[in-house]
Amino acid sequence: PAGRTHLRAESARLVDHLREAEALAEQLGDNQRRGRIANYLCISFSNLGEHDRAIAAGQRALALATASGAVDIQVLAQTYLGAAYYHVGDYRQALDVSRPALGLLAGEWRLARFGQAALPAISVRGVMAWSLTELGGFAEGYSLGEEAIQLGETIEQPYSIVFALSCIGLLSRRQGALHKAISAL
């Protein structure tokens, strides 16, 4: 409980700083910065359990990214907004928002990090695999999870590999394949 209280206070303070940054970016008329900030607000609100605000921020980020043509902001907005929809149980919307990021992350952008800890090509596959799992789309979810593991192994980045394995573990657990879940986890 004490750790959660501290984390919540830190997240709330981060939102305050992001709101200040958002006002400055708006004064500058810098829509790419506004899009980046909206992405971070989406994550922050999700961490606070304020999912409606997370969705609103994610939608704002996606609109700004689409208008400016910033691929990095668009991919992250699609991923974070997809995760926000997943957290409220709107799995179809999570898939609809996340799926276009797969197309953007083809070719030259496939291994792009965009400043993220986990490879976005892995993160978006994870969001989609989680959503497919909840909708009973186990085969497609496994396929996305396996692709995510292969990408993580390609870049040899432990955090990305762990994230991908956790997706397979969740999917396997939800399907009732506990031996596979335990192995992955």
Image: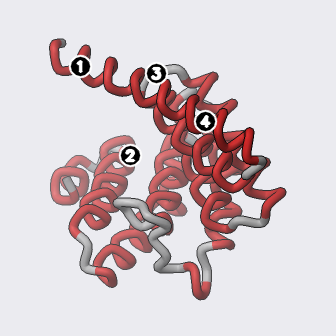
For the residue pair 10 and 56, the one nearer the viewer reads as: 10
Quadrant (top left/top right/bottom left/bottom right) for the N terminus: top left
Q: Which residue is mark 3?
A: 49
Residue 146, image x, y percentages: 39, 70
Residue at screen point 67% across, 49% down: 35
Residue 28, image x, y percentages: 73, 47
Q: Which residue is mark 2?
A: 175
Picture layout, residue 73 above or below residue 1: below
Picture layout, residue 2 above or below residue 101: above
Q: Sequence-wise, which precedes: disc 4 or disc 2? A: 4
For the residue pair 153 and 180, the one nearer the viewer reads as: 153
Picture layout, residue 35 above or below residue 3: below
**Residue 160: mark in rendering:** none
Q: Sequence-wise, which precedes: disc 3 or disc 1? A: 1
Q: Which residue is mark 1?
A: 6
Q: Is residue 5 left or right of residue 24?
A: left
Q: How many marks?
A: 4
Residue at screen point 25% across, 79% down: 156
Q: Sequence-wise, which precedes: disc 4 or disc 1? A: 1
Picture layout, residue 6 above or below residue 176: above
Q: Is residue 9 left or right of residue 21?
A: left
Q: CA distance from mark 4 to mark 2?
A: 21 Å
Disc 3 secondary structure class: loop
**Mark 1 or mark 2: which is in front?**
1
Q: CA distance from mark 1 to mark 2?
A: 35 Å
Q: Sequence-wise, which precedes: disc 3 or disc 2? A: 3
Q: Which residue is mark 4?
A: 85
